[in-house]
Image (spheres, grey):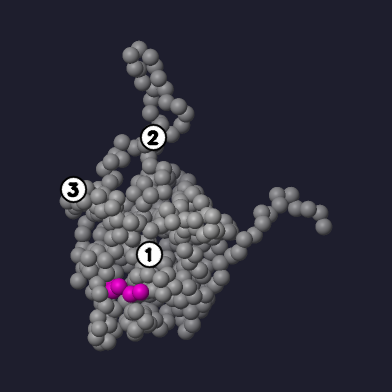
C-alpha cells in the first residue's frame, strides 16, 4: 500500500511537529543535495552530491537490459527480477545497489539518506511473501531497471514491497528516501514512513535529507521574501542608505549545510539560473550550481569525532553526479579528482548479459598551463 500526496495538500501543524522531531531525534551525518535544471526547450539535467562520513566505495555500474537481479532481505532471498531497461549509475560496494543513476529512457534518480524518519515495513517470515520484497539499497535499481516515466513508477509501486533489511557493508538498515525525474518534466519523492510508502509530486525537483518532504515544502514559506535582485537604497530619517555591495536581495538565504538550509538554497539557485546561460551550456551551469554544495573534510563534524585518536566521522562530498536526461549521459567526479568523467549507453553492450563496474578516477596533479619543453 502507498499514499499519493500532492505537494500543497499539507497540514500546517505538521511543520511544527516535524521541527520538534528534527531537534530531538539524533541525526547521523548526511548532506546529500539533489535537483534538476530545465532548459527552455524542455531538456533536463539532474544532479546530486553524495555526502557521507563512512567511505562508500563507489564505481560506475553499467547494467544491460535483461540483467538478472536478486535482492537480499537480511541475507535471505528476496525479490528477483529481470531488468527491462539498461541502466548507468553509481554503484556501491561492488554490487548492483545503485544510489544514483539514469536508464536508457532518461528516467533518473537517487537514494538520499533519511535518518530519524525512514520507517520500513517489517520483512515477512514466509519465503513466498518475501519473494515480493526489495531491500532499501536495491529499491532504486528496481525502479530504474523497470520503468520509463514517473507515471509508470507510480502505477507500478505496488508490484513489490519495500522492507527493512540490514545491510552489512554499512552495518545498519539504511534509512533512505528516493527522488525520481523523467524527460517529460515530472518529479516525485518516495518516502517510507511508519511502514507505509508515501509518494509526493515534487514540482520543485529538489530533495535533501531529513525532515520529511512535507516539512521542506512548508518551510519554503519562510523565505518568500528572497529575490535575486539587489534592493534599492532607502531613505531613513532623511539619510539615504544603500546596501553593502551585491547580493542584498538574497540577504537571509541560509548558508549552513543542514538539510533544511540546503533545500532552500538549492531552490534559490535553480529558480534564478539565467535561462540563456543554461540553454547555451547546461552541463557547465549544472556543475556550477552543484559546486555550491561541496563539503570539504573537516567542515561538518560529528560530536563523536576524535582527532586525537586519528579517527573522525566527518561528513564530506565523496562524489558528485549529473545525468543528462536528453542525451542519456551520466557524469561523475570525485573528491580526489574534480574532472567530470562521462559514460553513455553507447559505451557498452546494452543487450549483453553481464554488469560492468568501472573504477572512478584517482587523484591527478594539476596540468601545467604552459607545457614544459621536452
- In the foreground, 303 or 157: 303
**Considering the numbered disc 2 on the image, is that residue within a helix, a strand or a loop?**
loop
Left or right placement of residue 42 versus residue 224 in this view: right
Q: Give the quarter of the figure containing the N terminus.
A: bottom left
Q: Residue at x 47, y 48 (%)?
A: 292
- N-term-proximal mark, 3 vs 2: 3
Q: Main secondary structure of the magenta part?
A: loop
As measured in the structure, the alpha-carbon distance from the residue carrying label 1 to the one carrying label 2 is 32 Å
As measured in the structure, the alpha-carbon distance from the residue carrying label 3 to the one carrying label 2 is 26 Å
Is disc 2 surrounded by few (<14), some (14 to 19) or many (20+) residues within 10 Å? some
Q: Is residue 11 magenta?
A: no
170 lies above or below 185: below
As measured in the structure, the alpha-carbon distance from the residue carrying label 3 to the one carrying label 1 is 27 Å
Residue 191 visible, this orientation? yes
- N-term-proximal mark, 1 vs 2: 1
Residue 316 location, x and y as percent? 48, 56
Q: Is residue 163 magenta?
A: yes
Q: Residue at x 34, y 17 (%)?
A: 236
Is disc 3 surrounded by few (<14), some (14 to 19) or many (20+) residues within 10 Å? few
- N-term-proximal mark, 3 vs 1: 3
- Residue range in magenta is 162-166
Residue 200 location, x and y as percent? 25, 60
Residue 111: mark in rendering: 1
Residue 125 location, x and y as percent? 25, 83
The residue that mark 2 highlights is 251
Residue 115 lies in what quarter of the image? bottom left
Asked if marks 3 and 2 touch (Cβ < 8 Å), the reply is no
Residue 146 location, x and y as percent? 34, 75
Q: Give the quarter of the figure containing the C terminus.
A: bottom right
- In the foreground, 309 or 130: 309
The residue that mark 3 highlights is 12
Amino acid at each position: 500500500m502507498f499514499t499519493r500526496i500532492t505537494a500543497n495538500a499539507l497540514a500546517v501543524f505538521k511543520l511544527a511537529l516535524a521541527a520538534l522531531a528534527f531537534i530531538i531525534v539524533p541525526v547521523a551525518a548526511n548532506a546529500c543535495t539533489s535537483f534538476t535544471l530545465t532548459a527552455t526547450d524542455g531538456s533536463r539535467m539532474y544532479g546530486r552530491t553524495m555526502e557521507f562520513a563512512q567511505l562508500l566505495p563507489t564505481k560506475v555500474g553499467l547494467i544491460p537490459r535483461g540483467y538478472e537481479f536478486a535482492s537480499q532481505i537480511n541475507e535471505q532471498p528476496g525479490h528477483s527480477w529481470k531488468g527491462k531497461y539498461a541502466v548507468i549509475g553509481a554503484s556501491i560496494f561492488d554490487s548492483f545497489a545503485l544510489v544514483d543513476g539514469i536508464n536508457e529512457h532518461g528516467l533518473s534518480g537517487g537514494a538520499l539518506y533519511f535518518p530519524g524518519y525512514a520507517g520500513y515495513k517489517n520483512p515477512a517470515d514466509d519465503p513466498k511473501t518475501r519473494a515480493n520484497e526489495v531491500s532499501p539499497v536495491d529499491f532504486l535499481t528496481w525502479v530504474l531497471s523497470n520503468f520509463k516515466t514517473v507515471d509508470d513508477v507510480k502505477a507500478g509501486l505496488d508490484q513489490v514491497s519495500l522492507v527493512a533489511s540490514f545491510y552489512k557493508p554499512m552495518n545498519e538498515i539504511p534509512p533512505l528516501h528516493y527522488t525520481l525525474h523523467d524527460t517529460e518534466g515530472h518529479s516525485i519523492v518516495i518516502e517510507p514512513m511508519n511502514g507505509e510508502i508515501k509518494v509526493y509530486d515534487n514540482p520543485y525537483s529538489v530533495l535533501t535529507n531529513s525532515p520529511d518532504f512535507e516539512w521542506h515544502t512548508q518551510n519554503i514559506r519562510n523565505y518568500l521574501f528572497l529575490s535575486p535582485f539587489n534592493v534599492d537604497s532607502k531613505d531613513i530619517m532623511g539619510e539615504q542608505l544603500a546596501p553593502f555591495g551585491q547580493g542584498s536581495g538574497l540577504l537571509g538565504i541560509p548558508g549552513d549545510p543542514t538539510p533544511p538550509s540546503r533545500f532552500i538554497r538549492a531552490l534559490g539557485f535553480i529558480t534564478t539560473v539565467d535561462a540563456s546561460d543554461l540553454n547555451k551550456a547546461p552541463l557547465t551551469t549544472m556543475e556550477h550550481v552543484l559546486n555550491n554544495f561541496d563539503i570539504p573534510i573537516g567542515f561538518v563534524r560529528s560530536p563523536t569525532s576524535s582527532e586525537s585518536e586519528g579517527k573522525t566521522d566527518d561528513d564530506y562530498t565523496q562524489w558528485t553526479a549529473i545525468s543528462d536526461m536528453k542525451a542519456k549521459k551520466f557524469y561523475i567526479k570525485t573528491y580526489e579528482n574534480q574532472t567530470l568523467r562521462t559514460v553513455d549507453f553507447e559505451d557498452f553492450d546494452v543487450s549483453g548479459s553481464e554488469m560492468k563496474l568501472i573504477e572512478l578516477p584517482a587523484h591527478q596533479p594539476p596540468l601545467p598551463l604552459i607545457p614544459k619543453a621536452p
